[in-house]
Structure formats: C-alpha cells, structure tokens
C-alpha cells in the first residue's frame, strides 16, 4: 500500500475548508495526512482547529520580514520542513512568490467559475455582474491571481434574492465537498499537468 499523501494546509481565516479536510481524513475517506498547518496571522482561527486535531502549526507573518521576497522565502522554508506532497491554500489570503511556488505543488479553491471573477471578491463580483450561475473552482496555483490550470469546477445557481453572504454560504458547501473529492482523487491516482490541463488519476 502506498503512503498517505502528505498535506500542508495554509489558512488565513476561519479554517472551514481545513476542517472539512481534517474531518474527511479522520473518517478515513481521504488517503492523506495533514502534516502541518501554516498561517500568516497569529490570531487565525484555522490554527486553533489544527491544534485541536493535534496537527503541528507554524506562523509566518509578513510584518516579521523586510519585504515580500524575504517573507516568501521564509514561508517556503517552513513548508519544506514538512516535506509535503501537496500544499492546499484553504482561504490563504496571500499571493505566493517564486520561492514558495518552487517548494511544492499548490492546490487552491476559488468561489467563482474561473477564469471569470478572479481575486478576493469573486462572490461579490459575480453577483454584481448579474450571472445566473456561479460556483467554485479547484485549480493549481501559479504566479498569477487565480490563473493556474483548472482541475474541477462545480456550479451553484444564483437566486433572485441572494445577497453576497447567502450566495457565499451555498458556494462554501460545494467548495468543501469539491476540495475533499479533489484531494482524494489526487491522493489515490496522482496527477500530471499538460499545458492548461491537469490529469488527475492518470499520472
């Protein structure tokens, strides 16, 4: 039997995506192990979730470094300490630089159907544009903002009375399920990148 996929998860906020992964791993649904959780904020709720699950944590605040390049190198070093097979950015609200990106393969989920509505306000932007369908995208991370190769997308219908908050809550449900499913597929069958396409389960 192959070893479980080693995951490092990066978080900045409440950690609900992280919790979905931790729960799925604990239930034996995902052949993976969360070996560490990292954050850029000492007050991150996601860190408390990790500690409750007995997962090692680390904090790399941007303010502790002279510039973004130095922070990126420090983050890369902390990630490398845990030798991950895959790094999941689960609500991690920082753009990764070249040092971090060179240290591992990164998986992200975004609350819109990329390439539409990238960036920090994907739900608000989709709602303001008047789309009738939005959703969530799982993609690999590159040097751009939500521009990496897409792995999977799932849709959510926009209701006439939706607010940003109500729409985002429904997207989060889909996003958590999709993240668990994508990590399971990657852990089970591997992956390879062919240009803009990611082949999961056929690596």
Image (cartoon, grey):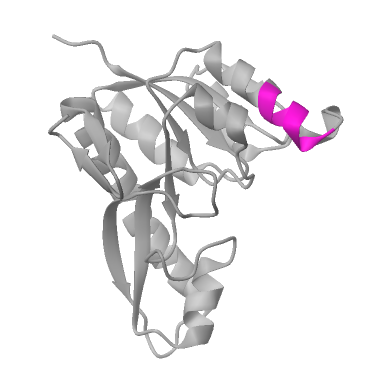
Taking the image as drawn, is residue 42 in sight? no
Judge by depth and name the residue closer to the eye, 55 or 64.
64
**Residue at the location (47% across, 67% down)?**
168
Residue 35 position within the rendered picture, expressed as x and y whole percent measured from the top left: 45, 17
Above or below, 121 relative to 10: below
Residue 71 falls within the magenta-colored stretch: yes
Residue 96 falls in image quadrant: top right
Above or below, 37 relative to 4: below
Above or below, 78 relative to 95: above
Chain part drawn in magenta: 67-73
Residue 154 falls within the magenta-colored stretch: no
The answer to whether 6 appears left or right of 11 in the picture is left
The answer to whether 144 appears left or right of 200 in the picture is right
Residue 64 position within the rendered picture, expressed as x and y whole percent measured from the top left: 84, 28
What kind of secondary structure does the magenta stretch mostly adopt? helix
User: Residue furthest toward the front?
Assistant: 195
Above or below, 179 relative to 192: below
Judge by depth and name the residue closer to the eye, 154 or 27.
154
Residue 155 position within the rendered picture, expressed as x and y whole percent measured from the top left: 28, 68
**Residue at the location (72% across, 36% down)?**
41
**Residue at the location (64% across, 44% down)?**
94
């Amino acid at each position: 039997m192959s070893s479980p996929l080693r995951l490092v998860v990066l978080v900045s906020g409440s950690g609900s995506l992280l919790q979905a992964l931790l729960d799925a791993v604990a239930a034996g649904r995902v052949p993976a192990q969360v070996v560490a959780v990292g954050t850029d904020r000492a007050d991150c709720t996601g860190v408390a979730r990790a500690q409750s699950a007995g997962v090692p944590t680390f904090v790399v605040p941007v303010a502790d470094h002279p510039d973004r390049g130095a922070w990126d190198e420090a983050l890369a070093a902390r990630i490398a300490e845990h030798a991950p097979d895959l790094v999941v950015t689960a609500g991690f609200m920082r753009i990764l630089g070249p040092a971090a990106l060179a240290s591992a393969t990164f998986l992200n989920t975004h609350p819109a159907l990329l390439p539409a509505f990238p960036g920090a306000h994907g739900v608000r932007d989709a709602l303001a544009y008047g789309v009738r369908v939005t959703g969530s995208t799982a993609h690999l991370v590159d040097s751009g903002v939500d521009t990496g190769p897409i792995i999977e997308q799932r849709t959510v219908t926009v209701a006439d009375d939706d607010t940003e908050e109500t729409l985002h809550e429904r997207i989060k449900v889909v996003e958590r399920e999709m993240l668990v499913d994508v990590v399971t597929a990657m852990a089970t069958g591997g992956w390879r990148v062919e240009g803009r396409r990611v082949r999961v389960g056929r690596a």
